[in-house]
Image (cartoon, rainbow, N blue to C red):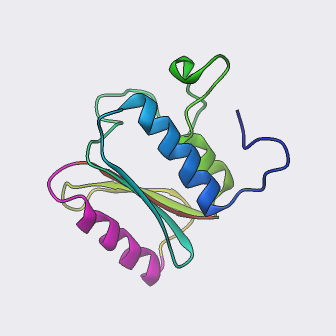
Amino acid sequence: MCLGKGYKASNELLLRRLRDTLWVLRPAAEVRTEVHIRWGVLTCDVDWLDGDERDAFRELVPHPEAGQNNSRAEVLITAFSSFAATTTSRPDEIDLLVGEFDQQDHEVLDYAKAQLRTSGRAVVFRV
């Protein structure tokens, strides 16, 4: 599960792991990843957590569709980040996962929210 032998947590690595999780969960979804200055930003045109009762950012969630002994990657974001938040296209919906907001965090969240258009979910974090 984790990051793999010899890997150190980075925005790029965590974005790649989360993107790979979403490709299995929602293969038809449009997933965009980018490193925006010091933040990792992932946007998806669907809210992959919608209707999921488990809190994927706070606990290990098995992911057998990706192979034996695999887990979803959302928990890695909270485990390795100094700041992480997730938002949807719904107004004023921001869930702070780790850390505290500063002005630049709000700017990056606003940027990510603007990418969502009418639906979806975004995750913004920094390692």
The outermost residue toward the right is 6
Q: Note whether 107 is above or below 59 in the view shown.
A: below
- Any magenta on residue 97? no
How many labels, in total?
0
Q: Position of residue 6 (x, y in %)?
A: 85, 49
Position of residue 108 relative to residue 85, above or below, is below
The answer to whether residue 56 is visible is: no
Task: Give residue 90's quadrant in the image.
Answer: bottom left
Magenta span has 118?
yes
Q: Is residue 73 left or right of residue 28?
A: right
Residue at the extreme left of the image, as rendered = 118
Q: Residue at x 56, y 17 (%)?
A: 64
Quadrant showing the C terminus = bottom right
Q: Residue furthest bottom?
A: 103
Residue 49: image quadrant is top left
**Looking at the image, which residue is at 84% across and 42% down?**
5
Look at the image and give the residue range highlighted in magenta: 102-119
Q: Residue 19, how many percent across, how many down?
A: 48, 45
**Residue at x-position 26% and y-position 48%:** 45
Residue 19 left/right relative to 2: left
Main SS, magenta residues: helix
Residue 103 lies, in percent from the top left, at 43, 83
